[in-house]
Image: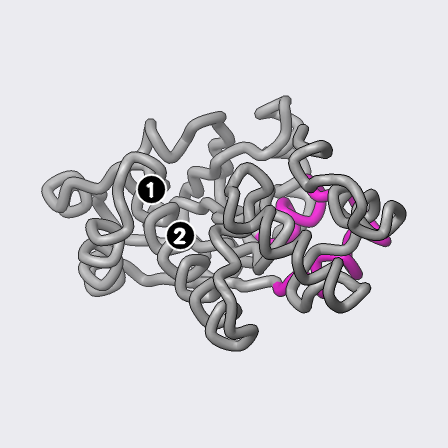
């Protein structure tokens, strides 16, 4: 068995981080399916592909809400947290080889971070842009993104206002956070409070525009 592992939602200030792993014996069916890095596909196409991928592959998905991300970051870096989640998914799938999309600037360091947290003895291939290089990682990225998008839909339904994608580059997200803070004097639910954007907004009590803090 081989598996691919990728995430969706590492950088946003709102919503969950989703890690997905998919495994199968041969990735030829995924090539035939036309899987690509999820960022290269629109939402309609991802939604079409996800159930087909899940029919072909054994699939494991972990979803970490914003409040759990904040709690974990009190103990470790985001890279370490992501390696921990990747390791958990690989252990559940127990493949011969696991291809992972390296979150660290060093591919080798991320491989070692992931390997040190695993119980199974799978070989780890850690590469930047693995979701473009390996169909099995592309498939994982698609399923992860679909789960993340549906999670954002539920958040928007719960709050009753448009929240956007959760990225601070999204004007809808900017407006949502700024307006909520100005009207209620606190950050909205499902916001990652350990993010610098959130902390600066709270410190300034919503006086400055959210796009002042991009980057």
Q: Residues within 10 Å of mark 1 (few under 14, many from 20)?
A: many
> Is residue 144 found left or right of 139 in the rendered image?
right
Distance of label 2 from label 1 (alpha carbons): 7 Å
Front residue of this view, candidates 154 and 127: 154
**Could you say where residue 169 lies in the image, as x and y percent from the top left?**
55, 37
**Could you say where residue 82 lies in the image, as x and y percent from the top left?**
63, 47
Residue at the image position 37 percent from the left and 35 percent from the top: 131
| Magenta segment boundaries in residue numbering | 65-85
Would you say residue 147 is visible in this rendering? Answer: yes
Quarter containing the C terminus: top right
Q: Which residue is mark 1?
A: 38
**Could you say where residue 118 lies in the image, as x and y percent from the top left?**
62, 51
Would you say residue 87 is visible in this rendering? Answer: no
- Of the numbered discs 2 and 1, the one sitting upstream in the chain is 1
Q: Which residue is mark 2?
A: 145
Tell whether position 56 is magenta.
no
Pointers 2 and 1 in contact (C-beta within 8 Å): yes
Front residue of this view, candidates 45 and 158: 158
Magenta stretch: helix, strand or loop mostly: helix
Secondary structure type for disc 1: helix
> Is residue 59 found left or right of 117 in the rendered image?
left
**Could you say where residue 208 lies in the image, as x and y percent from the top left?**
77, 40
Q: How is the image coloured?
A: one colour
């Amino acid at each position: 068995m081989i598996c691919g592992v990728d995430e969706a939602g590492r950088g946003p200030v709102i919503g969950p981080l989703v890690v997905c792993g998919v495994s199968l014996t041969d990735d030829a069916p995924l090539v035939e399916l036309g899987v690509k890095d999820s960022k290269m596909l629109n939402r309609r196409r991802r939604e079409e592909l996800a159930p087909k991928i899940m029919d072909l592959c054994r699939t494991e998905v972990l979803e970490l809400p914003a409040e759990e991300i904040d709690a974990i970051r009190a103990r470790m870096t985001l890279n370490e947290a992501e390696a921990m989640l990747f390791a958990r998914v690989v252990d559940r799938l127990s493949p011969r080889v696991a291809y992972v999309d390296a979150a660290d600037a060093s591919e080798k360091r991320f491989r070692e971070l992931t390997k040190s947290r695993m119980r199974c003895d799978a070989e780890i291939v850690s590469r930047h842009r693995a979701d473009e290089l390996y169909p099995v990682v592309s498939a994982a990225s698609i399923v992860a993104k679909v789960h993340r998008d549906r999670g954002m839909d539920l958040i928007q339904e719960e709050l009753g206002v448009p929240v956007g994608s959760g990225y601070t580059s999204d004007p809808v997200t900017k407006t949502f956070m700024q307006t909520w803070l100005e009207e209620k004097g606190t950050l909205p639910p499902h916001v990652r409070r350990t993010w610098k954007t959130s902390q600066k907004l709270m410190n300034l009590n919503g006086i400055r525009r959210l796009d002042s803090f991009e980057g």
